[in-house]
Image: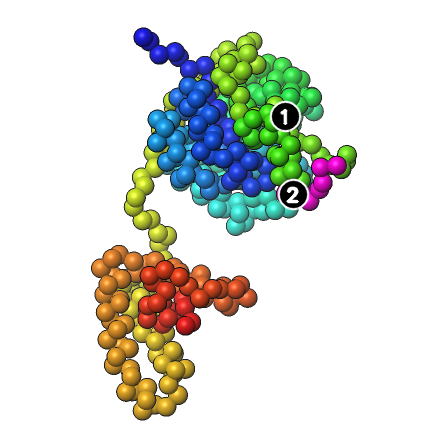
């Protein structure tokens, strides 16, 4: 019996890792996609990829293709208080690394009112290979311009995205129950047709079932510092933003079947695979010509000298005990090097000592390494 062709794939999902506006649990979302016969599912949390590994493992274990992406804020250079949105999906490992670079840069150098925003000029600096971009529907710069009836500005924005993501940019359509949805869809379809850009239908999933809307609104109120009963609070979401089935999406976009097909096609284009089970540490900055092993040895010996001065004020007592400490330190360093962890100890020492110097509380340490003399010498532990 021939398997049915998929009608739709969800390319937008805010899980509980979206922190401020998502309550969908990853395992439950994967189960919902599998139950509906979807071949793939995307996780696109707001401004982060925190849930990526958990989602990837859960999807693969159920025979579902995981698509990794991120819903991002994009700086509005005209009005920083009215940022735009865009959706990036990883088609390859290069795209994932590029996305991580942009997110890191946004958090470190371009936050505004707590939002980590990506700047458009970054897209031109290092290229966009490996990423597929969706316009952000009514929340993107194109959407904002169309809702303001500024077709000229919308055209310029669309041309920028199409040039930045050649053959990898889609004008995004949504019908999530917002009052201005149809006005946007009508003009977005017209714009895409004029510029010969592909359309894609998406649905912004914030929770799994329609009945979860009240719980989701409570989550949003907590994040925004408002209360449910406040009639003046902004209402950004609707009860329609649950995990709709393929049949529901097919009915919702019956007039635009190509937009549904493109959602499936985009999922096919995304082939980023995670390599799990292997430790990957940041590169610890080293003096030129010095190895990690040698630097760890030097730092540990220097730290031990300081500890010994504090432990044994009497020079004779210090000299008596020092050989035993040196012997233990050398044994531990050799063990750490053999296990491939010199960088790990240096990295942990770096952020622990930074925390201690900047008034951040630090615990006594835990795990197999917490009782080591190396950790004590590097300042990781104090007991």
Q: Are marks 1 and 2 in contact (CB under 8 Å)?
A: no
- Image spot of residue 51 (x, y percent): 45, 39
Q: How many marks?
A: 2
The residue lying at 58 percent from left, 21 percent from top is 174
Give, as a single range, the part of the protein colored magenta.
223-229
For mark 1, does the 10 Å Cα neighbourhood hold few (<14), some (14 to 19), or many (20 or more) residues?
Answer: some
User: What label sits on residue 239 in the rendered view?
Assistant: 1
The residue lying at 47 percent from left, 31 percent from top is 28
Viewport quadrant of the N terminus: top left
Judging by the rendered image, the residue that carries numbered circle 2 is 222
> Does 171 appear above or below 224?
above
What is the residue that sits farthest to the right in this orientation? Answer: 231
Measured in 3D between alpha carbons, the distance from the residue under mark 1 to the one under mark 2, in whole angstroms, is 18 Å
- Image spot of residue 186 (x, y percent): 63, 14
Residue 228 magenta-highlighted = yes
- Image spot of residue 63 (x, y percent): 35, 26
In this view, the residue in front, 61 or 139, is: 61
């Amino acid at each position: 019996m021939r398997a049915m062709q998929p009608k739709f794939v969800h390319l937008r999902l805010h899980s509980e890792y979206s922190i401020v506006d998502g309550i969908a649990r990853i395992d439950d979302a994967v189960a919902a996609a599998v139950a509906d016969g979807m071949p793939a599912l995307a996780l696109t949390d707001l401004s982060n990829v925190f849930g990526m590994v958990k989602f990837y493992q859960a999807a693969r274990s159920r025979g579902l293709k995981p698509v990794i992406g991120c819903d991002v804020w994009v700086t509005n250079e005209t009005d920083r208080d009215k940022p735009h949105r865009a959706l990036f999906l990883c088609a390859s490992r290069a795209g994932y690394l590029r996305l991580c670079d942009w997110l890191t840069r946004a958090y470190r150098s371009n936050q505004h009112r707590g939002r980590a925003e990506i700047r458009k000029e970054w897209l031109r600096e290092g290229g966009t290979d490996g990423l597929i971009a969706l316009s952000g529907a009514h929340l993107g710069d194109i959407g904002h311009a169309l809702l303001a009836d500024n077709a000229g500005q919308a055209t310029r924005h669309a041309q920028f995205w199409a040039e930045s993501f050649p053959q990898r940019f889609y004008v995004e359509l949504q019908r999530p129950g917002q009052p201005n949805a149809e006005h946007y869809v009508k003009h977005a379809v017209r714009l895409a047709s004029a510029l010969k850009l592909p359309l894609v239908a998406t649905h912004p999933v914030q929770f799994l079932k329609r009945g979860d809307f009240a719980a989701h609104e409570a989550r949003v109120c907590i994040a925004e510092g408002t209360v449910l009963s406040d009639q003046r609070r902004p209402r950004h979401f609707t009860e329609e933003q649950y995990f709709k089935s393929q049949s529901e999406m097919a009915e919702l976009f019956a007039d635009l079947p190509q937009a549904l097909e493109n959602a499936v096609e985009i999922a096919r284009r995304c082939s980023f695979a995670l390599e799990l089970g292997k430790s990957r540490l940041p590169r610890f900055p080293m003096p030129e010509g010095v190895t990690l092993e040698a630097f760890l040895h030097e730092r540990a010996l220097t730290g031990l000298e300081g500890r010994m001065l504090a432990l044994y004020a009497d020079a004779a007592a210090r000299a008596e005990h020092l050989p035993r400490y040196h012997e233990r330190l050398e044994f531990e360093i050799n063990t750490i090097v053999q296990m491939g962890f010199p960088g790990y100890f240096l990295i942990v020492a770096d952020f622990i000592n930074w925390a201690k110097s900047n008034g951040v509380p630090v615990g006594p340490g835990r795990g197999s390494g917490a009782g080591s003399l190396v950790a004590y010498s590097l300042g990781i532990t104090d007991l």
